[in-house]
Amino acid sequence: MKKSLLAILLISFSFINAQTPCAGGTAGPYSCDGYDLQSAISLAQMNATAGNDSWGWTDPSNGDEYALIGLNNGTAFIDITNPTTPIYLGKLPTHTSSSTWRDIKVYNNHAFVVSEANNHGMQVFDLTRLRSVTSPPVTFSEDAHYNGFGSAHNLVINEDTGYAYGVGTGSYNGGPHFVNIQDPINPIAAGGYEVDGYSHDAQIVTYCGPDKDYSGREILIGSNEDEVIIADITDKNNPVDIATISYSNVGYSHQGWFTEDERYFILGDETDELGSGFNTRTIVFDFEDLDNPQFHFEHFGTTPAIDHNGYTRGTKYYMASYRAGLRVFDLTNIAGGSISEEGYFDSYPGSNSANFSGAWSVYPYFDSGNIVISDINRGFLLVKAATIDLTAPTANCQNITLVLDASGNATITASDVDNGSSDNSGTVYLEICNDTFTCDDLGPNDVTLEIYDDFGNKDYCTSVVTVIDALAPVLECPADLTVEYDSGSAFYTVTDFGVTAADNCTASPTITQDPAVGTELTAGIYTVTIEATDTEGNMSDCSFQLTVEGELSIQNVTLEAGLALYPNPTSDILYIASENQRINSIVVYDILGKEYLSNNQINSENTSIDLSRLSQGVYFIKINNLVIKRIIRK
């Protein structure tokens, strides 16, 4: 139906301009460099007197593209599937009164619209209705309305979480007002954040940047008039300040956007050109550490025009610069402290002065490469780079095995799961979000690798990262131990020796000992072996010597009280003297019980033995079959 109306529409809407290439520095009345004019629709033809914000929607059912244009009296919807013959489908009128300010975002095939008009609230419009417009232009009605706030300067949506955030409202001191829009036509108030005051604009992401402390958290970057604030708003009931940062020659911190890798934040100050008199200034911050953001550098443009809204895609930054129109910057050397203007399309011919007229916003996210310019004075313009790469890269993943360290952690990089991803340009950029693993992740984990090229064309693949724990527990065995028979018994009963083990993943490894607890031992020397096993089956062991001595009778006590062995340690002769009893017999054996020397015909208070033929080590000597002493051959 849409295509059958094309001939009628082309006649009826003669105000639509056909494609005008950029040649010799101009495209019709507009100056340009590297960007062609695809088409335009004037404010008059949309029955409005001023334009403002813009956004876009791609129909997931067929890939058709639509521009959403903010007007002083409503929101216009334009089918740009055929970019040189766009179709103005109609307008959603403002909820209350006209206003200079209107902002639009999209989630789950619905447009959400706010305005600074009194009591405007948030309009919700089902964009799938645009598929069936047969007699454009039509006047649309909203599908739902949220009145939890009245006016709002701007609207931010995190499509990952399904939350909208009105900023610059009359609630929460102008800070973000949380709205759950997971069911788009049933928006629900979800609190707000007012600690850092009025937010003029913001970006909110499910964080996937270099600061691993905040991976997967919902992070707000607010442009708050005289500073930039960073907050963790994951818990809607308990938003947490992370950091703030300001900069020199502050005029009005207006709006900013992350680079694709969420390392750098690019900010536009709306009044610094007026207040300080320099050319268009773009400020770049390094957000590698969200707790400690740093000023990186500032870039000055070629005109004195005021910068307004800007967005990144791939390695390019698309900026609406009021009277200087669309300005496009190459970000490939942003880490090195510089960006460069690579092209432009000036939607406000004749002047690049620092005034509040011309390009309000741009939308550069259509797969077709077409870029929307919403102009305060001229309405809707659609442009496209004269030289552009629309071919998506090819993502290629590999599965890997990852071993946890002694702390139960491990990390990977995007290159670890990449298996030769490629692009026709020869350059691809790799990103992964879930790059940190712990004991909770043992087993297979799906990791999505995102690759993109300079123009922001993307592809994805999935790697299986199998996380394993290959480390055995660490045991702490006791020193060698000498024990006596149980009281009134002819043996010693083995107890739990209280050996502990530490493991990277298992809080309490399984510990066994041999001889087992409860084993009854007679006098002698035993080797006790302890084993520790974690839940993954990793095992370690240790051992110590247990010497069991019989219960000391009065005779034992008398003999031991008068004994002297010297020198101990010794390298050769060991002397033995007994004051209370005569020495009748001696036996020398090692810690394993092997006998080395024996003499049972002594019958003297003093004797000696030659140990020089024994290897160095620990030995035991039993005297009169009553007393056991440890001796050392050095």
Image (spheres, grey):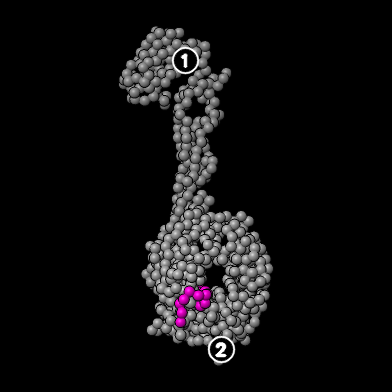
The residue type indicated by label 1 comes to: Leu
Which residue is at a point 39% across and 70% down the rendered structure image? 340
Closest to the observer: 55 or 152? 152
Which residue is at a point 43% across and 12% down the rendered structure image? 563
Q: Quadrant of the C terminus?
A: top left
Residue located beneath label 2 in the image: 13
Mark 1 neighbour class, 10 Å CA radius: few under 14, some 14 to 19, many 20 or more: some
Give the answer, above or below, for where 341 lies relative to 554: below
Q: Main secondary structure of the magenta part?
A: loop
Left or right relative to 240: residue 450:
left
Tally of marks: 2
* The magenta segment: 350-364
- For residue 626, the mark is 1
Closest to the observer: 494 or 230? 230
Point out residue 331 in the picture as x, y percentages from the top left corner. Answer: 41, 67
The nearer-to-camera label among 1 and 2 is 2
Left or right relative to 367: residue 163:
right
> Pointer 1 and pointer 2: residues touching (CB < 8 Å)?
no
Left or right relative to 461: residue 195:
right
